[in-house]
């Protein structure tokens, strides 16, 4: 038996969210007294996969058949379910990325497993098996009891602290091949801005709204984000107006994020906006209106004109980074 | 082309959320229910596709009698008919099993869903249904077109997007941008009353999980305001107090 962690990678590098999932998997496996095994699919080197050992995986199963070289929810779910059966997984863990959201429910159906998505803390295994997740778009938490023999869980990015130790994992090749009927989705084109920090996984997010007046003022927002190593986000009207791409739009109808630090600049804090960001650990709001609703949801605030404050804040960050 | 659109009835975004004393379910008194916004996008795209290519749009929901206003709204917007599986959804596996059963009985070319519901925020139903039917799925799509028996969709990936192609039948989940929701007109509202709404019995499935209690987030302590001319003070607090930089 085992705890099985699905490991995602991008351009040959394991994603940070997968190190997080592996750490979670290892801590859970200790409580359940089981080994922690990882599974990776597609083109990635054994050297890279061995790194998972330092995060607690004792073994990495690598499904590398050519039919699995590009992502398809159906074929990847088939591979993970097949490895889960071979490794007699009691729990299958995945980090809730866009792709995983389309694949994990399939794994659960294949294994006839109970499924919980977007889990935000360690499972409680003291009696039964309980997990906790956000619900009602940030307005509540749901505590869920899972009754099935096998459980499939996705964890929300940035919800568990990555712990790196020593060690190197053994990598074994698995020859799972999807059937033709499982590989019908063909990728025609991938458009990726590789220089950008991925928004759902970012630890720090700098976000701006209509208070910035126009796209010509985004240079200072980009500078602040760069100084902090942060990803960029925006409010919905900003994306609707074409000032920023829709992929940066956060909120109820956009991306949901839970970074360690969310800096909201010139955003009023409408309930639909908060729905996507309220689980951020620390929230900073910069707004010229002291009555802006966002201040009620913030930890730190500055009242004033963003166009004046942001460049000064960037300078302060640079001085801080130089000193530390 | 026959399209099935899965809709769920959810509390309006701006409603305050409260729970029953045992914290096991939502207190529904005074709560305004709406079509889940993403399902509304899916429904609109389904209507656009059938208006262009010809065909029929059926909506399905798993819910008790209280979900009928939302079904009538979907019919008023333009769906041809509706199915209500008469049961209170227990977990995603339960709901998906009901939808998969209805789909098996009716052979749809396309099943369109919203990518997630704003109440449970699970994003599970589309992929579960697809797996139960053993057909392909493309999730979190911002664009969808159909040419003959093949769909082309643009789906979101981390830091970018991907254009994919896939043969029908398939399941697609819609996110913001696939279509702009429509407001029903008077004629639509009138005709919705007489459009067919089939009420069916739920199939029994094992209980794999359940919500044992909801709770609300701790309110954040009151905001600490920092003078506008002291940004270095903010950085210091983020470093020493919040420990996030
Ligand atoms: C169904 C539905 C779904 C929605 N989904 C989303 C969503 O996913 N995400 C989202 O963001 N919104 C969403 N909205 C829209 C939401 O209700 C708000 O309209 C939107 O978030 C407001 O964006 P904003 O804060 O940028 O603009 P505004 O509300 O116009 O606020 C601008 C803010 O900037 C401040 N400001 C102005 N000038 C300056 C300055 N010089 N310096 C500092 N501050 C300044 C103002 O005081 C104000 O607080 C949705 C709405 C609906 C109905």
Image (tube, coloured by chain):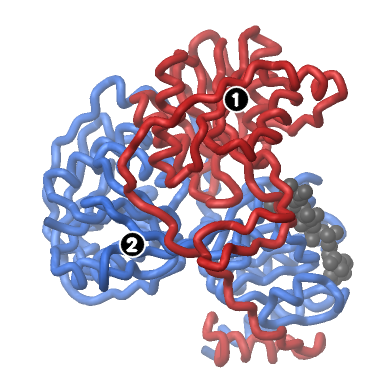
Chain colours: A blue, B red
Q: With respect to residue B217, does A43 lie above or below?
A: above
The answer to which image quadrant residue A183 occupies is top left
From the top left corner, tell me how far across and down residue A113 is, in percent: 28, 46
Kindly identify the residue that appears in the image at 46 percent across and 38 percent down.
Answer: B125
Q: Give the crowd class for mark 2: few <14, some 14-19, many >=20 residues within 10 Å.
A: many
Which of discs 1 and 2 lies nearer the camera? The answer is 1
Which element carries disc 2, helix, strand or loop?
A: helix
From the top left corner, tell me how far across and down residue A243 is, in percent: 77, 50
Kindly identify the residue that appears in the image at 47 percent across and 23 percent down.
Answer: B165
Q: Chain of mark 1?
A: B
Q: Quadrant of ligand 1?
A: bottom right
The answer to which image quadrant residue A312 occupies is bottom right
Q: Relative to the observer, which residue lies in front, B219 or B242? A: B219
Would residue B61 appear left or right of A29 to someone viewing this image?
Answer: right
Kindly identify which residue carries mark 2: A21
Kindly identify the residue that appears in the image at 41 percent across and 27 percent down.
Answer: B100
Instruction: Decide if residue A243 is in sight here.
Output: no
Would residue B240 appear left or right of A26 to someone viewing this image?
Answer: right
Q: Give the crowd class for mark 1: few <14, some 14-19, many >=20 residues within 10 Å.
A: many
Q: With respect to residue B177, does B187 lie above or below?
A: above
Kindly identify which residue carries mark 1: B59
Q: Chain of mark 2?
A: A
From the top left corner, tell me how far across and down residue B107 is, in percent: 45, 13
Which element carries disc 1, helix, strand or loop?
A: strand
Marks 1 & 2 on one chain: no
Would residue A157 appear left or right of A283 to someone viewing this image?
Answer: left
From the top left corner, tell me how far across and down residue A218 is, in percent: 76, 60
Would residue A287 appear left or right of B202 to someone viewing this image?
Answer: right
Quadrant where the C terminus of chain B is found in the figure = bottom right
Q: Relative to the observer, which residue lies in front, B21 or A115? A: B21
């Amino acid at each position: 038996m085992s705890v099985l962690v699905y490991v995602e990678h991008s351009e040959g590098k394991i994603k940070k969210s997968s190190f997080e999932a592996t750490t979670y998997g290892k801590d859970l496996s200790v409580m359940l007294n089981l080994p922690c095994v990882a599974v990776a699919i597609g083109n990635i080197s054994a050297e890279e996969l061995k790194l998972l050992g330092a995060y607690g995986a004792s073994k990495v199963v690598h499904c590398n058949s050519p039919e699995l070289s590009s992502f398809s929810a159906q074929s990847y779910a088939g591979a993970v379910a097949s490895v889960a059966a071979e490794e007699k997984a009691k729990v299958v863990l995945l980090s809730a990325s866009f792709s995983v959201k389309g694949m994990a429910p399939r794994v659960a159906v294949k294994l006839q497993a109970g499924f919980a998505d977007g889990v935000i803390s360690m499972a409680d295994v003291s009696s039964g098996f309980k997990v906790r997740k956000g619900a009602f778009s940030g307005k509540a938490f749901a505590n869920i009891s899972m009754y099935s023999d096998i459980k499939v869980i996705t964890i929300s990015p940035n919800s568990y602290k990555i712990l790196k130790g020593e060690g190197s994992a053994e990598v074994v090749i698995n020859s799972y091949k999807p059937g033709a009927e499982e590989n019908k989705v063909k990728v025609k084109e991938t458009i990726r801005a590789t220089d950008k920090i991925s928004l759902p996984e970012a630890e720090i997010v700098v976000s701006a709204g209509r208070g910035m007046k126009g796209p010509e003022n985004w240079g200072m927002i980009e500078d602040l984000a760069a100084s902090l190593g942060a990803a960029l986000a925006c409010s919905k009207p900003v994306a609707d107006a074409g000032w920023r791409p829709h992929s940066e739009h956060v909120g109820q109808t956009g991306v949901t994020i839970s970074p360690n630090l969310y800096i909201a600049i010139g955003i009023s804090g409408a309930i639909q906006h908060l729905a996507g960001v309220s689980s951020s650990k620390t929230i900073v709001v910069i707004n010229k209106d002291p009555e802006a609703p966002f201040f009620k949801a913030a930890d730190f605030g500055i009242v004033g004109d963003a166009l004046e404050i942001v460049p000064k804040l960037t300078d302060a960050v640079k001085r801080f980074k130089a000193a530390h | 082309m026959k399209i099935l659109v899965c809709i769920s009835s959810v509390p309006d975004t701006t409603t305050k959320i409260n729970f029953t004393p045992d914290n096991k379910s939502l207190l529904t008194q005074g709560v305004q229910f709406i079509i889940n916004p993403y399902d509304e996008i899916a429904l609109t795209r389904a209507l656009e596709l059938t208006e262009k290519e010809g065909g029929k749009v059926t909506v399905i929901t798993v819910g008790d009698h209280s979900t009928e206003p939302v079904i009538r709204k979907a019919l008023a917007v333009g769906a041809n008919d509706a199915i209500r599986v008469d049961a209170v959804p227990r977990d995603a596996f339960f709901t998906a099993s009901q939808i998969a059963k209805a789909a098996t009985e009716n052979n749809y070319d396309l099943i369109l869903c919203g990518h997630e519901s704003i109440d449970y925020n699970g994003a599970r139903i589309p992929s579960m249904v697809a797996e139960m039917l053993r057909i392909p799925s493309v999730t979190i799509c911002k664009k969808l077109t159909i040419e003959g028996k093949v769909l082309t969709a643009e789906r979101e990936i981390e830091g970018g997007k991907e254009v994919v192609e896939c043969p029908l039948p398939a399941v697609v989940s819609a996110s913001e941008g696939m279509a702009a929701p429509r407001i029903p007109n008077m004629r639509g509202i009138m005709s919705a009353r007489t459009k067919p709404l089939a009420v069916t019995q739920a199939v029994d499935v094992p209980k794999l999980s359940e919500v044992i209690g909801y709770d609300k987030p701790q309110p954040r302590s009151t905001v600490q305001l920092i003078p506008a001319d002291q940004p270095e003070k903010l950085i210091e607090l983020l470093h020493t107090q919040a420990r996030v930089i």
